[in-house]
Image (cartoon, helix red, strand yellow):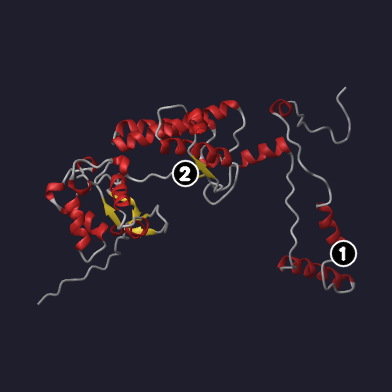
Amino acid sequence: MSVPRRKTGKQEPIPKKKCQGECKKERAYSFFFKVDSPMFPDGMINICRDCVIIEVDKNDIEQVISFLRQIDKPFMQNYWDEALKSNRHPLGEYIRKVNSLSQMKGKNFDNSDGINGVGKIDLSSTKLPEQLENVKGEIIVYSDNLVSKWGVGYKKIEYLKMEKFYQDMRLTHEIHTPVHVNKLMELAYLTIELERLRQERDIPNYTKLAKTIDDMEKSAGFRPVDRKGIDDATGIRSFAQIWEEVEKKGFRKPPKLDFDEDIVDAMIVSLGNYYHRLVGKQILSEIPDDIREELDSFYEDDLTPVDINDEEYENLDFSIGDEDGDSDE
């Protein structure tokens, strides 16, 4: 009697994707709800089911409908009522049922029942925020000033989103000239148009406009890599950019740090003692005063950089003179 051999080859790694929700974890595909919307090319939403369960209140029907709209799944009142009676989490159960039923194949949010089974869902009935926060936590509220700034013809939430985009970019990028301000406002308008195309599921035009926005951000220096700060999201900028700023604004001295002696200080003492033992000098117990004074004097010189404009920068002379003081005659 022959016994089938067991496979000894290495197992293929389980495919994973990063959750864009609160947890930010790399999770197996089975942790993500399946959808057939072109907005999600890999066939799964970009937030894991655990984060969805936390972020979407199953007892708030408006939150549920808003979530289904984002993933382009229809809301069917009878299926939702059945999901509420199940022993599983109703949102996960509802999506499982909608994905499995043949009569729901090809249906999207536009095919939704109305709340309580009457007509189509009135999207204006879903709650929208009355205010937004910029990256500094400052509150942005709807006002006549926003309408005057951005023009008529937009919804309240669109005014808030454009202003948030505008303020966030001004806070995180070097934007000073009128040209850059105008470019920024153009981008703010286009982000709203992009959102409208997404809601209309106009994928060809959505893709074209997204490419246009990306090109505009690149040419204007508005990409994440161009941000004026250095943080975990952007990483350090190119050395060429840093060198250009040093040339324009001068050396920026780091702030003086006050801290207890550490291993580096101990190493300085150890190296000093090695020399002292060779020449018969007294053994050190701490950093020598002359070395400490030299380090402290670094912070006493006023090396505060002075900003110069582009014209002054162009006129700077970076040539290196003759060290011997001789000149060609």
Indicate which disc residue 168 carries. none
Query: At 40% across and 52% down in the image, what residue appears?
Result: 20
Where is mark 1, residue-wise?
289
Viewer-proximal residue among 51 and 297: 51
Looking at the picture, which amino acid does disc 2 mark? Gln
Q: Is residue 40 visible?
A: no
| Quadrant in the picture for the C terminus | top right
Identify the element where label 1 is drawn. helix
Q: Residues within 10 Å of mark 2 (few under 14, many from 20)?
A: some
Give the alpha-carbon distance from disc 1 to disc 2, as whole Å. Answer: 58 Å
Task: Report the residue marked by disc 2.
Answer: 131
Residue sitting nearer the eye, 317 or 57? 57
Answer with left or right where residue 47 lies relative to residue 86: right
Determine the residue located farthest toward the top in the rendered image. 329
User: x and y percent of residue 162 in the render?
Assistant: 47, 36
Residue lying farthest to the left in this orientation: 1
Name the amino acid, label 1.
Asp
Which residue is nearer to you in this view: 80 or 228?
A: 80
In the picture, the quarter occupied by the N terminus is bottom left
Residue 229 in view: yes
Residue 23 in the image, given as x and y percentages of width and height? 42, 59
Q: Is residue 93 above or below residue 149?
A: below
In terms of secondary structure, where does tag 2 sit? strand
Residue shown at 74% from the left, 27% from the top? 312
Query: Is label 1 or label 2 in front?
Result: 2
Q: Quadrant of residue 170?
A: top right
Viewed as shown, does residue 9 lie left or right of 305?
Answer: left
Q: Is residue 26 left or right of residue 203?
A: right
Answer with the quarter of the image where residue 280 lies: bottom right
* Residue 297 rendering spot, x and y as whole percentages: 84, 54
